[in-house]
Image: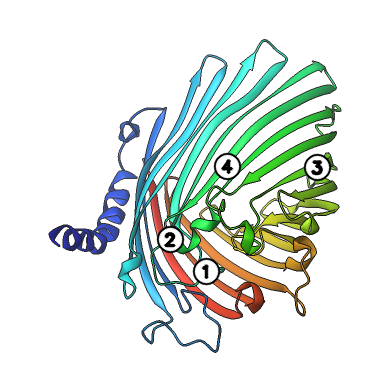
Amino acid sequence: MQRNRLASALARILPTSLLLVGGAACSLPAWAAISDTISPFIATSYSYDNNLFRLDENVPGFNGERSDTSRQVQAGFLINRPIGRQLLTGQLKWSRVFFNHFDQLDYTGKDYLADLEWHIANHLEGHVGASYSQTLTPFSDLQSTDRNLRTIRREYANGGWRFHPSWRVRGGFSRDKYTYDSIAQKISDRQEDALELGFDYLPASESRVGIQLRHLKGTYPNRANLAAFGVEQGYEQDEVKANIYWRFSGVTQVQLLGGWVKRKNELFTGRDASGANGRIVVYWAPLGKVRFTGSLWHEFAAVENSLISSSLNNGASLAAAWDISAKVRMDAQVRREKRDFSAASGLILPGDVSDTTRTTTIGLTYAPRPNIQLGVNAFRDERKGAPFVNTGTYHANGISFNASAQF
């Protein structure tokens, strides 16, 4: 009990304290940083969400409440350490989040990341690293007042051999593991192992044209006894895609990863699917202070659902960044995505089994000093759901205020 009271008191005091400490830090000389290798940082935010659990418009709120405010404090440090020709980068971050009404959701977040960029001689290079993230699972696909922390672990290693000034062969392996605290969502625990092999042509213009082969294997460790209920146990996905980066000019660049994908299920082959998959991203900076990023995608994706393990997603997004002045930046984004569950499931499902999500965000950041940032962000999130697969129709609006300081 005393520990909870202390944590709650710290949550109220720390935001102001962090700002005062950060403001004082910006006037200190360079010795404020531990070294050129380690850069500590602190941050705080205050957020409001008028539909925290993403409830359907016709569903009453839990205990009569739909909205809530939350406070977050963060502390950590960044790592940037050259080791000869190698470069070690990383981040360690601790966060504590407190909710005003639904305080059973209070949690401690942890984020770790380490990456080693390695070089051997003049033609071999790559990356090896790992990451760990623990945070509250989004409520968009599972509405529950129980605290459900999602942990994502990732390990990877890759490398490339530039055997000719214009030609490179590369390969890599990655493992992603998703686990959930909630007993209701333990069925969605999964592991994905991916192998990649690529061959690229690298002209002097800094563009890239290549082909990429990828094999993905997904397994669900907690579904061994559920096959009789029609629950899939795992899947494999094979991809053959063009991998293109076209530097049209200093103003415009285009990135494309697209081709043919075949997705096979371990038990229920009637749910297998195949077809064109891809994503294209366009970077456009017509003015030095204004930048746009546009994306289009048509690809399979995992779904955290007991009946359906994947969907075919069609989406588009447009983001803009405007440097209003040397200290003020505005960011905005609009995003729309339709998930088609019937196309990937192979099941005979009633009606239109798909959902469509639209998200709009806008934010303003003020940097009074290079190592201090103050910001405000607002969002609107809405979905037309598919009740058959437990994705509801909802609208949500929210706003957050944040501040951070790096030493």
Q: Is residue 229 visible?
A: yes
Question: Closer to the camera: disc 1 or disc 2?
Answer: 2
Q: Which residue is denoted by mark 3 in the rendering?
A: 239
Vertically, is 36 above or below 236? above
Q: Which residue is denoted by mark 1 in the rendering?
A: 142
Q: Are marks 1 and 2 in contact (CB under 8 Å)?
A: yes
Q: Which residue is denoted by mark 2 in the rendering?
A: 182
Q: Earlier in the sequence, mark 4 or mark 1?
A: 1
Question: Closer to the camera: disc 2 or disc 3?
Answer: 2
Q: Are marks 3 and 4 in contact (CB under 8 Å)?
A: no
Q: Secondary structure at mark 2?
A: loop
Identify which residue is drawn at 55% across, 71% down. Answer: 379
User: Which amino acid type is marked by label 4?
Assistant: Asp
The reply, left or right, for residue 370 in relation to residue 117 is left
Q: Secondary structure at mark 1?
A: loop
Marks 3 and 1, Cα distance to the nearest angstrom? 30 Å
Which mark, by number, is residue 176? Answer: 4
Q: Earlier in the sequence, mark 1 or mark 2?
A: 1
